[in-house]
Amino acid sequence: MSRRAPDLKGWPVIGPAIELGKRGPLNVFVDGQRTLGDVFGFSLLGRYQLVVCHPDILREMVIKKGRNFIKGPAYDEFRKLGGEGLISSEGARWRSDRRTLQPAFRRARIAALEEMMVRCIAERLDAVFAEDAPVDVGDVMMRVALVIMGYALFDQDLSDSATATAAAMTEALSLLLARSDQPISLPLWMPSPGNRAVVRALDTLDAHVRLVLDRYRTSGKTESGALLLEMLANARDAETGEPFSDRALRDHIVTLFVAGHETTALTLTWCVTLLHAHPDLRARVEAEVDVVLGRRDPTVADLDRLVYTQQVLKETLRLRPPLWAVARNAVEDDTLGGFAVPAGTWTVGCLYLAHRHPDVWPDPERFDPDRFAPDADIRSGAWEPFSLGPRKCIGDRFAMMEMTFTLAMLIQRGWLERVDDDPVDWVASISLRPARPVMATPRAR
Protein backbone atom coordinates (compact mmCIF):
# COMPACT_ATOMS: atom_id res chain seq x y z
CA MET A 1 0.00 0.00 0.00
CA SER A 2 1.30 3.46 -0.89
CA ARG A 3 2.06 5.84 1.95
CA ARG A 4 1.70 9.58 2.36
CA ALA A 5 4.82 11.59 1.60
CA PRO A 6 6.45 13.46 4.50
CA ASP A 7 5.13 17.01 4.89
CA LEU A 8 6.83 20.37 5.11
CA LYS A 9 6.15 22.13 8.39
CA GLY A 10 3.45 24.75 8.23
CA TRP A 11 0.48 26.39 9.88
CA PRO A 12 -3.13 25.18 9.84
CA VAL A 13 -4.97 26.16 6.64
CA ILE A 14 -2.15 28.30 5.18
CA GLY A 15 0.49 25.57 5.46
CA PRO A 16 4.01 26.86 4.68
CA ALA A 17 2.64 29.96 2.88
CA ILE A 18 4.60 32.39 5.05
CA GLU A 19 7.87 30.55 4.49
CA LEU A 20 7.23 30.22 0.75
CA GLY A 21 6.47 33.92 0.49
CA LYS A 22 9.44 35.01 2.57
CA ARG A 23 12.14 32.72 1.15
CA GLY A 24 10.70 31.71 -2.21
CA PRO A 25 9.57 28.20 -3.19
CA LEU A 26 12.90 26.93 -4.54
CA ASN A 27 14.81 27.72 -1.34
CA VAL A 28 12.09 25.91 0.61
CA PHE A 29 12.27 22.94 -1.77
CA VAL A 30 16.06 22.71 -1.44
CA ASP A 31 15.70 22.49 2.33
CA GLY A 32 12.77 20.09 1.95
CA GLN A 33 14.80 17.63 -0.09
CA ARG A 34 17.68 17.81 2.37
CA THR A 35 15.49 17.07 5.40
CA LEU A 36 12.61 15.01 3.97
CA GLY A 37 13.98 13.27 0.88
CA ASP A 38 13.16 13.21 -2.82
CA VAL A 39 9.37 13.36 -2.41
CA PHE A 40 7.56 15.60 0.06
CA GLY A 41 4.25 17.37 0.26
CA PHE A 42 2.38 20.26 1.85
CA SER A 43 -1.12 21.71 1.95
CA LEU A 44 -1.58 25.33 0.90
CA LEU A 45 -4.99 26.91 1.45
CA GLY A 46 -6.66 23.51 1.26
CA ARG A 47 -4.83 22.28 -1.87
CA TYR A 48 -2.39 19.39 -1.48
CA GLN A 49 0.88 19.75 -3.39
CA LEU A 50 3.66 17.23 -3.93
CA VAL A 51 7.28 18.01 -4.85
CA VAL A 52 9.47 15.43 -6.61
CA CYS A 53 13.23 15.91 -6.89
CA HIS A 54 14.69 12.63 -8.20
CA PRO A 55 15.26 12.19 -11.96
CA ASP A 56 13.60 8.76 -11.99
CA ILE A 57 10.47 9.99 -10.21
CA LEU A 58 10.33 13.05 -12.46
CA ARG A 59 10.39 10.72 -15.45
CA GLU A 60 7.67 8.59 -13.85
CA MET A 61 5.46 11.66 -13.49
CA VAL A 62 5.97 13.21 -16.91
CA ILE A 63 6.53 10.21 -19.20
CA LYS A 64 5.42 6.92 -17.66
CA LYS A 65 2.25 8.36 -16.11
CA GLY A 66 1.97 11.46 -18.23
CA ARG A 67 -1.65 10.86 -19.22
CA ASN A 68 -2.72 11.15 -15.58
CA PHE A 69 -0.53 14.15 -14.77
CA ILE A 70 -1.76 17.03 -16.93
CA LYS A 71 -0.91 20.73 -16.85
CA GLY A 72 -4.35 21.66 -15.55
CA PRO A 73 -5.01 24.68 -13.32
CA ALA A 74 -1.30 25.15 -12.50
CA TYR A 75 -1.04 26.99 -15.84
CA ASP A 76 -4.15 29.13 -15.51
CA GLU A 77 -2.18 32.36 -15.01
CA PHE A 78 -0.07 31.66 -18.10
CA ARG A 79 -3.21 30.95 -20.11
CA LYS A 80 -4.25 34.56 -19.56
CA LEU A 81 -1.24 35.51 -21.69
CA GLY A 82 -0.53 32.51 -23.92
CA GLY A 83 -4.09 31.22 -24.28
CA GLU A 84 -4.15 27.72 -25.72
CA GLY A 85 -0.61 27.74 -27.10
CA LEU A 86 1.60 24.67 -26.87
CA ILE A 87 2.72 25.39 -23.30
CA SER A 88 -0.76 25.41 -21.80
CA SER A 89 -3.11 23.46 -24.10
CA GLU A 90 -4.13 19.88 -23.34
CA GLY A 91 -5.41 16.66 -24.89
CA ALA A 92 -6.55 16.46 -28.51
CA ARG A 93 -6.04 20.20 -29.03
CA TRP A 94 -2.40 20.01 -27.97
CA ARG A 95 -1.70 16.82 -29.98
CA SER A 96 -3.18 18.32 -33.15
CA ASP A 97 -1.33 21.62 -32.80
CA ARG A 98 1.96 19.97 -31.91
CA ARG A 99 1.70 17.71 -34.97
CA THR A 100 0.90 20.70 -37.18
CA LEU A 101 3.74 22.87 -35.86
CA GLN A 102 6.46 20.23 -35.56
CA PRO A 103 7.66 20.45 -39.21
CA ALA A 104 8.39 24.18 -38.76
CA PHE A 105 10.92 23.36 -36.05
CA ARG A 106 12.86 20.59 -37.74
CA ARG A 107 16.53 21.29 -38.21
CA ALA A 108 16.26 21.93 -41.95
CA ARG A 109 13.56 24.58 -41.42
CA ILE A 110 15.33 26.21 -38.48
CA ALA A 111 18.45 26.46 -40.64
CA ALA A 112 16.58 28.96 -42.83
CA LEU A 113 16.70 31.41 -39.90
CA GLU A 114 20.49 31.34 -39.80
CA GLU A 115 21.14 34.54 -41.76
CA MET A 116 18.66 36.63 -39.78
CA MET A 117 19.91 35.24 -36.47
CA VAL A 118 23.58 35.89 -37.20
CA ARG A 119 22.83 39.42 -38.45
CA CYS A 120 20.89 40.29 -35.30
CA ILE A 121 23.56 38.91 -32.97
CA ALA A 122 26.35 40.70 -34.82
CA GLU A 123 24.57 44.06 -34.78
CA ARG A 124 23.85 43.91 -31.04
CA LEU A 125 27.30 42.68 -29.99
CA ASP A 126 29.09 45.17 -32.26
CA ALA A 127 27.10 47.99 -30.67
CA VAL A 128 28.11 46.83 -27.19
CA PHE A 129 31.82 46.66 -28.03
CA ALA A 130 31.68 49.99 -29.87
CA GLU A 131 30.46 51.79 -26.74
CA ASP A 132 33.24 50.33 -24.56
CA ALA A 133 31.31 51.04 -21.36
CA PRO A 134 30.08 48.83 -18.50
CA VAL A 135 26.91 46.95 -19.40
CA ASP A 136 24.35 44.76 -17.70
CA VAL A 137 25.01 41.32 -19.22
CA GLY A 138 21.38 40.35 -18.71
CA ASP A 139 20.23 43.42 -20.62
CA VAL A 140 22.65 42.70 -23.48
CA MET A 141 21.49 39.09 -23.82
CA MET A 142 17.83 40.04 -23.49
CA ARG A 143 18.19 42.57 -26.32
CA VAL A 144 19.84 39.94 -28.52
CA ALA A 145 17.03 37.48 -27.82
CA LEU A 146 14.30 40.10 -28.26
CA VAL A 147 15.54 41.28 -31.63
CA ILE A 148 15.78 37.69 -32.91
CA MET A 149 12.32 36.65 -31.72
CA GLY A 150 10.88 40.01 -32.75
CA TYR A 151 12.01 39.56 -36.34
CA ALA A 152 11.12 35.85 -36.37
CA LEU A 153 7.57 36.28 -35.07
CA PHE A 154 6.53 39.94 -35.27
CA ASP A 155 8.50 41.14 -38.29
CA GLN A 156 10.05 43.97 -36.26
CA ASP A 157 12.81 44.76 -33.76
CA LEU A 158 11.41 44.36 -30.25
CA SER A 159 14.69 45.04 -28.43
CA ASP A 160 13.59 48.66 -27.92
CA SER A 161 11.24 48.68 -24.94
CA ALA A 162 9.63 51.83 -26.33
CA THR A 163 7.78 49.82 -28.99
CA ALA A 164 4.13 49.24 -28.13
CA THR A 165 4.43 45.47 -28.52
CA ALA A 166 7.51 45.13 -26.32
CA ALA A 167 6.02 47.42 -23.68
CA ALA A 168 2.73 45.51 -23.64
CA MET A 169 4.48 42.14 -23.50
CA THR A 170 6.77 43.27 -20.69
CA GLU A 171 3.90 44.73 -18.68
CA ALA A 172 1.64 41.71 -19.15
CA LEU A 173 4.44 39.32 -18.18
CA SER A 174 5.43 41.25 -15.08
CA LEU A 175 1.83 41.68 -13.89
CA LEU A 176 0.94 38.04 -14.45
CA LEU A 177 4.21 37.01 -12.78
CA ALA A 178 3.23 39.04 -9.73
CA ARG A 179 -0.20 37.36 -9.71
CA SER A 180 1.36 33.89 -9.90
CA ASP A 181 3.45 34.63 -6.80
CA GLN A 182 0.32 35.40 -4.76
CA PRO A 183 -1.57 32.62 -2.91
CA ILE A 184 -4.88 34.16 -4.05
CA SER A 185 -5.48 36.37 -7.13
CA LEU A 186 -8.64 38.23 -8.03
CA PRO A 187 -10.31 37.02 -11.25
CA LEU A 188 -9.57 39.34 -14.16
CA TRP A 189 -13.22 40.39 -14.53
CA MET A 190 -13.02 42.21 -11.19
CA PRO A 191 -12.11 45.87 -11.88
CA SER A 192 -9.11 46.27 -9.59
CA PRO A 193 -6.22 48.57 -10.67
CA GLY A 194 -3.95 45.55 -11.20
CA ASN A 195 -6.55 43.70 -13.25
CA ARG A 196 -7.26 46.74 -15.41
CA ALA A 197 -3.52 47.04 -16.13
CA VAL A 198 -3.34 43.35 -17.16
CA VAL A 199 -6.38 43.64 -19.44
CA ARG A 200 -5.03 46.84 -21.01
CA ALA A 201 -1.64 45.24 -21.73
CA LEU A 202 -3.26 42.11 -23.20
CA ASP A 203 -5.56 44.21 -25.41
CA THR A 204 -2.56 46.16 -26.75
CA LEU A 205 -0.68 42.94 -27.43
CA ASP A 206 -3.66 41.33 -29.18
CA ALA A 207 -4.17 44.39 -31.36
CA HIS A 208 -0.57 44.31 -32.52
CA VAL A 209 -0.66 40.60 -33.32
CA ARG A 210 -3.77 41.23 -35.44
CA LEU A 211 -1.95 44.07 -37.20
CA VAL A 212 1.05 41.87 -37.97
CA LEU A 213 -1.16 39.08 -39.32
CA ASP A 214 -3.28 41.46 -41.42
CA ARG A 215 -0.16 43.02 -42.91
CA TYR A 216 1.26 39.62 -43.79
CA ARG A 217 -1.98 38.42 -45.36
CA THR A 218 -2.32 41.59 -47.40
CA SER A 219 1.20 41.52 -48.82
CA GLY A 220 1.81 37.77 -48.74
CA LYS A 221 5.28 38.37 -47.34
CA THR A 222 7.12 39.86 -44.38
CA GLU A 223 9.44 42.85 -44.54
CA SER A 224 12.30 41.27 -42.60
CA GLY A 225 11.93 37.60 -43.45
CA ALA A 226 9.97 36.60 -40.37
CA LEU A 227 10.08 32.92 -41.23
CA LEU A 228 8.46 31.64 -38.05
CA LEU A 229 5.53 33.97 -38.66
CA GLU A 230 5.27 32.70 -42.24
CA MET A 231 5.46 29.07 -41.12
CA LEU A 232 2.70 29.60 -38.55
CA ALA A 233 0.45 31.53 -40.92
CA ASN A 234 0.85 28.88 -43.63
CA ALA A 235 0.59 25.81 -41.39
CA ARG A 236 -2.22 23.36 -42.13
CA ASP A 237 -3.68 20.70 -39.90
CA ALA A 238 -2.29 17.32 -40.96
CA GLU A 239 -5.76 15.70 -40.86
CA THR A 240 -8.21 18.43 -41.87
CA GLY A 241 -5.98 20.64 -44.02
CA GLU A 242 -7.40 23.68 -42.20
CA PRO A 243 -5.23 26.65 -41.21
CA PHE A 244 -5.05 27.96 -37.67
CA SER A 245 -7.79 30.34 -36.58
CA ASP A 246 -6.75 33.92 -35.81
CA ARG A 247 -7.07 33.19 -32.10
CA ALA A 248 -4.93 30.05 -32.35
CA LEU A 249 -2.29 31.96 -34.34
CA ARG A 250 -2.25 34.69 -31.72
CA ASP A 251 -1.81 32.12 -28.92
CA HIS A 252 1.03 30.32 -30.70
CA ILE A 253 2.86 33.54 -31.61
CA VAL A 254 2.70 34.90 -28.06
CA THR A 255 3.61 31.54 -26.49
CA LEU A 256 6.63 31.05 -28.74
CA PHE A 257 7.77 34.61 -28.07
CA VAL A 258 7.51 34.29 -24.29
CA ALA A 259 9.18 30.87 -24.23
CA GLY A 260 11.74 31.72 -26.88
CA HIS A 261 13.46 34.84 -25.63
CA GLU A 262 13.86 34.58 -21.86
CA THR A 263 15.34 31.07 -21.75
CA THR A 264 18.16 31.97 -24.11
CA ALA A 265 18.86 35.36 -22.52
CA LEU A 266 19.03 33.94 -19.01
CA THR A 267 21.18 30.97 -20.03
CA LEU A 268 23.71 33.23 -21.75
CA THR A 269 23.78 35.56 -18.76
CA TRP A 270 24.46 32.66 -16.42
CA CYS A 271 27.06 31.32 -18.86
CA VAL A 272 29.05 34.57 -18.72
CA THR A 273 28.81 34.49 -14.93
CA LEU A 274 30.03 30.89 -14.66
CA LEU A 275 32.85 31.27 -17.19
CA HIS A 276 34.09 34.34 -15.32
CA ALA A 277 34.97 32.03 -12.44
CA HIS A 278 36.61 29.51 -14.81
CA PRO A 279 38.96 31.35 -17.20
CA ASP A 280 40.63 28.06 -18.14
CA LEU A 281 37.33 26.73 -19.50
CA ARG A 282 36.66 29.96 -21.33
CA ALA A 283 40.08 29.57 -22.96
CA ARG A 284 38.96 26.17 -24.27
CA VAL A 285 35.90 27.77 -25.86
CA GLU A 286 38.12 30.45 -27.44
CA ALA A 287 40.46 27.81 -28.83
CA GLU A 288 37.57 25.87 -30.38
CA VAL A 289 35.97 28.99 -31.87
CA ASP A 290 39.32 30.06 -33.36
CA VAL A 291 39.82 26.68 -35.02
CA VAL A 292 36.25 26.19 -36.26
CA LEU A 293 35.32 29.75 -37.22
CA GLY A 294 38.32 32.03 -37.17
CA ARG A 295 36.82 35.46 -37.91
CA ARG A 296 33.92 34.36 -40.11
CA ASP A 297 30.29 34.15 -39.03
CA PRO A 298 28.98 30.78 -37.83
CA THR A 299 26.59 28.69 -39.89
CA VAL A 300 24.32 25.78 -39.12
CA ALA A 301 26.98 23.47 -40.56
CA ASP A 302 29.34 24.60 -37.77
CA LEU A 303 27.07 23.45 -34.95
CA ASP A 304 28.35 19.88 -35.06
CA ARG A 305 31.93 21.18 -34.77
CA LEU A 306 31.36 23.65 -31.93
CA VAL A 307 31.28 20.71 -29.54
CA TYR A 308 32.85 22.20 -26.43
CA THR A 309 30.96 25.47 -26.86
CA GLN A 310 27.71 23.52 -26.62
CA GLN A 311 29.01 21.48 -23.69
CA VAL A 312 29.52 24.74 -21.79
CA LEU A 313 25.96 25.81 -22.58
CA LYS A 314 24.55 22.43 -21.54
CA GLU A 315 26.42 22.53 -18.23
CA THR A 316 25.11 26.06 -17.68
CA LEU A 317 21.59 24.75 -18.28
CA ARG A 318 22.23 21.97 -15.78
CA LEU A 319 23.29 24.27 -12.96
CA ARG A 320 21.10 27.26 -13.78
CA PRO A 321 18.02 26.00 -15.67
CA PRO A 322 15.74 28.95 -16.48
CA LEU A 323 12.85 26.47 -16.35
CA TRP A 324 13.55 25.26 -12.82
CA ALA A 325 10.32 23.27 -12.31
CA VAL A 326 7.43 21.70 -14.20
CA ALA A 327 3.96 21.56 -12.69
CA ARG A 328 1.25 18.98 -13.24
CA ASN A 329 -2.19 18.12 -11.85
CA ALA A 330 -3.20 14.54 -10.95
CA VAL A 331 -6.46 13.60 -12.70
CA GLU A 332 -6.99 10.39 -10.73
CA ASP A 333 -5.53 8.80 -7.60
CA ASP A 334 -1.99 7.60 -8.32
CA THR A 335 1.46 7.09 -6.85
CA LEU A 336 4.89 8.64 -7.46
CA GLY A 337 8.01 7.08 -6.05
CA GLY A 338 5.77 4.81 -3.97
CA PHE A 339 3.96 7.73 -2.32
CA ALA A 340 0.23 8.36 -2.60
CA VAL A 341 -0.95 11.09 -4.96
CA PRO A 342 -4.66 11.83 -4.46
CA ALA A 343 -6.68 13.09 -7.43
CA GLY A 344 -6.42 16.86 -7.74
CA THR A 345 -2.90 17.05 -6.27
CA TRP A 346 -0.61 19.66 -7.78
CA THR A 347 2.71 17.94 -8.45
CA VAL A 348 5.90 19.93 -8.95
CA GLY A 349 8.87 18.31 -10.67
CA CYS A 350 11.90 20.28 -9.47
CA LEU A 351 14.33 20.29 -12.40
CA TYR A 352 16.82 22.38 -10.42
CA LEU A 353 17.21 19.57 -7.88
CA ALA A 354 17.02 16.72 -10.43
CA HIS A 355 19.85 18.43 -12.35
CA ARG A 356 22.16 18.19 -9.35
CA HIS A 357 21.00 14.92 -7.79
CA PRO A 358 24.03 13.08 -6.37
CA ASP A 359 22.69 9.72 -7.60
CA VAL A 360 23.48 10.94 -11.12
CA TRP A 361 25.93 13.82 -10.88
CA PRO A 362 29.21 13.41 -8.91
CA ASP A 363 30.24 16.64 -7.15
CA PRO A 364 27.02 18.17 -8.49
CA GLU A 365 27.75 21.85 -7.72
CA ARG A 366 31.00 21.84 -9.70
CA PHE A 367 30.89 23.51 -13.14
CA ASP A 368 32.25 20.82 -15.47
CA PRO A 369 31.28 20.95 -19.17
CA ASP A 370 33.04 17.62 -19.77
CA ARG A 371 29.98 15.97 -18.21
CA PHE A 372 28.46 16.50 -21.66
CA ALA A 373 31.33 15.11 -23.72
CA PRO A 374 30.17 13.38 -26.94
CA ASP A 375 30.42 9.91 -25.36
CA ALA A 376 28.47 10.89 -22.21
CA ASP A 377 25.38 8.85 -21.37
CA ILE A 378 22.96 11.25 -19.68
CA ARG A 379 20.22 9.56 -17.65
CA SER A 380 16.67 10.47 -18.65
CA GLY A 381 15.20 12.96 -16.20
CA ALA A 382 18.61 14.14 -14.99
CA TRP A 383 19.06 16.93 -17.57
CA GLU A 384 15.82 18.34 -18.88
CA PRO A 385 16.17 22.14 -19.29
CA PHE A 386 13.56 22.09 -22.07
CA SER A 387 11.26 19.78 -20.10
CA LEU A 388 10.86 16.14 -21.11
CA GLY A 389 8.58 13.63 -22.74
CA PRO A 390 6.05 14.57 -25.41
CA ARG A 391 5.68 18.06 -23.84
CA LYS A 392 9.35 18.87 -24.40
CA CYS A 393 9.88 22.38 -25.79
CA ILE A 394 9.30 22.41 -29.54
CA GLY A 395 11.92 25.13 -29.99
CA ASP A 396 14.87 23.45 -28.29
CA ARG A 397 16.90 23.30 -31.54
CA PHE A 398 16.17 26.97 -32.23
CA ALA A 399 17.31 27.89 -28.71
CA MET A 400 20.52 25.85 -28.86
CA MET A 401 21.41 27.31 -32.26
CA GLU A 402 20.83 30.85 -31.02
CA MET A 403 22.83 30.34 -27.82
CA THR A 404 25.72 28.61 -29.62
CA PHE A 405 25.91 31.36 -32.23
CA THR A 406 25.77 34.09 -29.58
CA LEU A 407 28.46 32.60 -27.33
CA ALA A 408 30.76 31.89 -30.29
CA MET A 409 30.31 35.37 -31.77
CA LEU A 410 30.90 36.97 -28.37
CA ILE A 411 34.14 35.00 -28.00
CA GLN A 412 35.21 36.13 -31.49
CA ARG A 413 34.92 39.77 -30.43
CA GLY A 414 36.36 39.43 -26.95
CA TRP A 415 34.56 39.01 -23.65
CA LEU A 416 32.26 40.71 -21.18
CA GLU A 417 34.58 41.00 -18.18
CA ARG A 418 32.64 41.18 -14.92
CA VAL A 419 33.38 44.25 -12.81
CA ASP A 420 33.39 42.21 -9.60
CA ASP A 421 34.07 38.68 -8.43
CA ASP A 422 31.18 38.42 -5.99
CA PRO A 423 28.94 35.37 -6.35
CA VAL A 424 25.65 36.00 -8.13
CA ASP A 425 22.74 34.46 -6.26
CA TRP A 426 19.54 33.43 -8.01
CA VAL A 427 15.92 34.27 -7.48
CA ALA A 428 13.33 31.72 -8.61
CA SER A 429 9.93 32.90 -9.77
CA ILE A 430 8.65 31.55 -13.08
CA SER A 431 12.28 31.53 -14.27
CA LEU A 432 15.63 31.24 -12.49
CA ARG A 433 17.05 34.76 -12.71
CA PRO A 434 20.14 36.47 -11.29
CA ALA A 435 19.25 38.21 -8.04
CA ARG A 436 21.08 41.37 -9.17
CA PRO A 437 22.41 42.87 -12.40
CA VAL A 438 25.56 41.19 -13.73
CA MET A 439 27.71 44.17 -14.67
CA ALA A 440 30.60 43.72 -17.08
CA THR A 441 32.97 45.70 -19.28
CA PRO A 442 33.45 44.74 -22.96
CA ARG A 443 37.07 43.71 -23.59
CA ALA A 444 37.94 43.34 -27.26
CA ARG A 445 40.42 40.66 -28.32
Image (cartoon, rainbow, N blue to C red):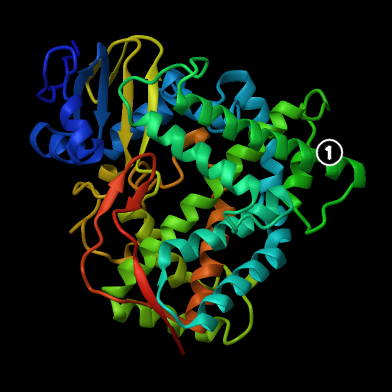
Label 1 crowd (10 A; few <14 / some 14-19 / many >=20) = few
Residue position marked by numbered label 1 in the rendering: 214
Residue at image point 91% right, 47% down: 219
Q: Residue at x 39, y 29 (%)?
A: 179
Which residue occupies 31% across, 67% down? 274
Q: Taking the image as drawn, is residue 428 in sight?
A: yes
Task: Classify 97 as above or below 316.
Answer: above
Residue 218, x across and y down, in percent: 91, 42
Report x, y in % for residue 150.
65, 53
Tag 1 secondary structure: helix
Q: Left or right: 23 with respect to 328? A: left
Q: Classify the position of the N terminus by image quarter.
A: top left
Residue found at the far bottom of this picture: 445
Q: Relative to 437, say whether 349 is above or below.
A: above
Is residue 381 placed above or below 318 in the rendered structure? above
Q: Is residue 373 visible?
A: no
Q: Which of 238 and 30 lies nearest the eye of the viewer?
A: 30
